[in-house]
Image (cartoon, helix red, strand yellow):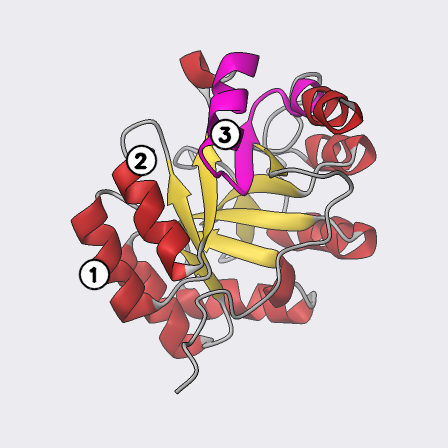
C-alpha cells in the first residue's frame, strides 16, 4: 500500500527559493498591525503569507484583531476585506483563529476561494471542530513536543505544523519531517534576526514568521545569489 502523505495540498509557489516568508500580523513596520494597509504592504513586498488574527465582533462580523475587542475599538478591519485583497493578489493567509465559530471561518474562506491558500492555527479542539465543518481546511496545530506531535499527526494528519521557540527542537522537527509535514516556525521577539533565520533554514523550516519580512526577503535573495 502506498504511504499516505500528510501534505495533501501543495504549498504556495514561492517568489524566491527557501522558506515561505510569513509577515506576522501583516507587514506592519510602517502600518498598523492587522490593518488592510499592512496586508497591502505585505502583498507589495512579495511575502508568501500574511498572518492575521481573526475574532468575532458584537454584530457577528469577523474582524482583524489580536486582543479582545473593547468598546473603544472603532473601524476594525473586516476579515472579508482582507480575504478579498489576498485572493486578488495570490498571497497566502496564515490564520490565527482567535474567537469565531468554525462555520463562520469556513464560510468566509469558501466565499473568497481561499481554502487552498490558507493555513489555520488554533488549539486541537477547534481544529477538530473545523475539520468536521470543512474537511478540506488546511489545519496547522502547534508541535508542543515530539510525543504530542506524533499523536497530533496520527489523529489530525495536518499538512503543516506550527513551531515556536519552545518546541523548535531537533527531535520535534524530525517527527514533522518524517511525516512529510511542513514546518512553519515563529522567529519573533529576540529570535527575529538573521542568525535565528539562518538557524531555522539550516534545521529545515519551510516557513518563517517574522515582524521583519523585508529583511528576511533580502537575506533569502542574497543566499540564492550566493
Mark 1 to mark 3 CA distance (whole Å): 26 Å
Of residues 62 and 191, the one drawn nearer to the viewer in this rendering: 191
Are the residues at dot 2 and dot 3 in contact (C-beta closer than 8 Å)?
Answer: no
Q: Quadrant of residue 27?
A: top right
Question: Residue at the location (35% across, 62% down)?
Answer: 127
Based on the displayed image, in which of its 4 quarters is residue 153 positioned?
bottom left
Query: Within the magenta stretch, is there residue 210?
Result: yes
**Marks 2 and 1, the one that precedes in the sequence:** 1
Q: Magenta stretch?
A: 194-216
Q: Position of residue 38 (x, y in %)?
A: 70, 30
Per the rendering, the mark at residue 202 is: 3
Q: Nearer the viewer, residue 163 or 87?
A: 163
Residue depicted at 41% across the width and 77% down the height? 3
Q: Which of marks 3 and 1 precedes in the sequence? A: 1
Residue 12 location in percent, x, y? 68, 54
| Vertical placement of residue 63 versus 187, above or below | below
Amino acid at each position: 500500500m502506498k504511504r499516505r502523505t500528510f501534505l495533501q495540498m501543495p504549498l504556495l509557489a514561492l517568489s524566491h527559493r527557501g522558506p515561505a516568508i510569513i509577515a506576522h500580523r501583516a507587514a506592519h513596520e510602517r502600518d498598523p498591525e492587522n490593518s488592510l494597509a499592512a496586508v497591502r504592504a505585505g502583498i507589495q513586498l512579495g511575502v508568501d503569507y500574511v498572518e492575521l488574527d481573526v475574532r468575532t465582533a458584537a454584530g457577528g462580523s469577523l474582524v482583524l484583531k489580536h486582543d479582545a475587542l473593547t468598546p473603544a475599538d472603532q473601524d476594525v478591519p473586516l476579515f472579508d476585506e482582507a480575504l478579498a485583497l489576498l485572493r486578488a493578489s495570490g498571497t497566502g493567509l496564515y490564520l490565527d483563529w482567535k474567537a469565531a465559530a468554525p462555520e463562520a471561518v469556513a464560510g468566509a474562506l469558501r466565499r473568497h476561494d481561499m481554502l487552498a491558500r490558507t493555513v489555520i492555527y488554533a488549539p486541537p479542539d477547534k481544529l477538530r471542530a473545523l475539520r468536521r465543518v470543512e474537511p478540506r481546511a488546511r489545519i496547522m496545530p502547534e508541535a508542543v513536543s515530539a510525543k504530542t506531535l506524533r499523536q497530533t499527526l496520527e489523529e489530525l494528519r495536518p499538512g503543516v505544523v506550527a513551531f515556536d521557540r519552545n518546541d523548535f527542537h531537533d527531535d520535534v522537527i524530525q517527527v514533522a519531517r518524517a511525516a512529510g509535514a511542513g514546518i512553519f516556525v515563529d522567529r519573533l521577539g529576540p529570535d527575529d534576526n538573521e542568525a535565528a533565520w539562518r538557524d531555522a533554514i539550516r534545521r529545515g523550516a519551510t516557513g518563517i514568521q517574522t515582524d521583519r519580512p523585508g529583511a528576511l526577503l533580502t537575506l533569502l535573495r542574497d543566499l540564492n545569489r550566493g
